[in-house]
Image: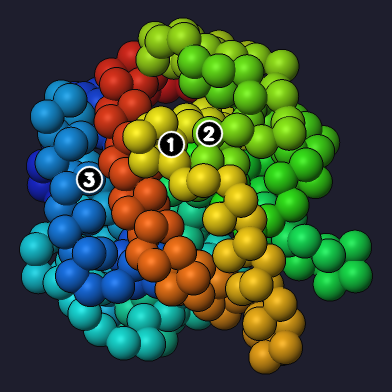
Amino acid sequence: MKFIDIKDELKDAIIKDKPVVALESTIISHGMPYPDNLETALSLEDIIRKEGAIPATIAIINGRIKIGLNREELEYLARAENIIKVSRRDLAIIIAKNGSGATTVAATMYCASLAGIKVFATGGIGGVHRGAEKSFDISADLEEFKRTKVAVVSAGVKSILDIGATLEKLETYGVPVLTYQTDIFPDFYTRLSPFKVDYMVNTPEEAADIINVKWELGLDGGVLIANPVPEESEIEPGLIKTAIENALKEAKTKDISGKRITPFLLKKIVNLTDGKSLNTNISLVKNNAYLAARIAKHVKKEG
């Protein structure tokens, strides 16, 4: 396939309809510091393998869409500075220029779909930013959910966002939002938010059934499975709320917006919580990889 390199192991898995789970690379280059980012990336792949699925970390390397990365490529993304954050709009530009970059949720969904991968695990998706009624800052992730047939397991949306507005946008786009073993939409760093959802699933099989039926009906777009952070890893709500508010104030003072804002806020929140938010982030993304692998074993190839 033009512009795409798929690891032989993954080619075989996709052809034989074995379970595969996509992983993004922005979490490596922009979500965590070294060496936590590399250790987490390797751990996610190991978790997925232990659950009987095959991991497919996705990135752009030297103008090629890489479906599945080797250790050297993971090291490069984890260590290199100024790695470009690649969303859907950036794909053609970075590829045409033979550039390298880490894929966001939106770009990972699109590239996974090109390769025939149906399930994707991440930390938290992007959404409607606070104050979007003035800034119009809405993540391309939501548009991707509208059009791309990939099921995404996440711990909800990033807590720095407007959760209520994001859920409204997903509803408008016809995207099913399922919560796992709770009817409360998780707040990324914590298990609870003020928002309930209409549809809860209790098993990976139940989630896969809904995913399969959606696509068999000919309905385009993705599915969001919101998986709460493990109870032992969540942050005290008051602490994370204060940290987020202070980080947002600093971002506004420094006029940081667009692509730069999420990495800036995540890094600032790690500092303001004395590293607790990083530990929580690692725990929740591992939890999502575990669930995604279990769901992938029941999602049909054709849909």
Q: Quadrant of residue 21?
A: top left
The label shown at residue 300 is none
Farthest residue to the bottom: give it: 254
Residue 285, visible in the rendered structure: no
Q: Is residue 165 left or right of residue 149?
A: right
Pinpoint residue 149: horizontal percent, then vertical percent: 53, 35
- Cα separation, mark 2 vs mark 3, equals 21 Å
Helix, strand or loop at mark 2: loop
Identity of the residue drawn at 34% across and 27% down:
291
**Camera-nearest residue between 104 and 253:** 253
- Label drawn at residue 229: 1
Residue denoted by label 2: 191
Name which quarter of the figure residue 164 lies in. top right
Left or right: 49 as drawn, with respect to 271: left
Amino acid on which the number 2 mark rests in the picture: Arg
Q: Do callouts 2 and 1 mark residues in contact (Cβ within 8 Å)? A: yes
Crowd tier of the residue under label 3, counting other residues whose Cα lies within 10 Å: few below 14, some 14–19, many 20 or above: many
Q: Distance between the residues labelled 2 and 1?
A: 6 Å
Residue drawn at the location 73% of the way across and 82% of the way down: 252
Q: Nearer the viewer, mark 2 or mark 3?
A: 2
Q: Callout 1: few (<14), some (14-19), or many (20+) C-alpha neighbours within 10 Å?
A: many
Amino acid type, mark 3: Leu
Q: Mark 3 points at which residue?
A: 44
Query: Type of residue at label 1?
Result: Val
Identify the residue at horizontal 38%, vertical 15% (top origin): 204
- In the figure, is residue 93 to the left or right of 128? left
Q: In which quarter of the image is the N terminus?
A: bottom left
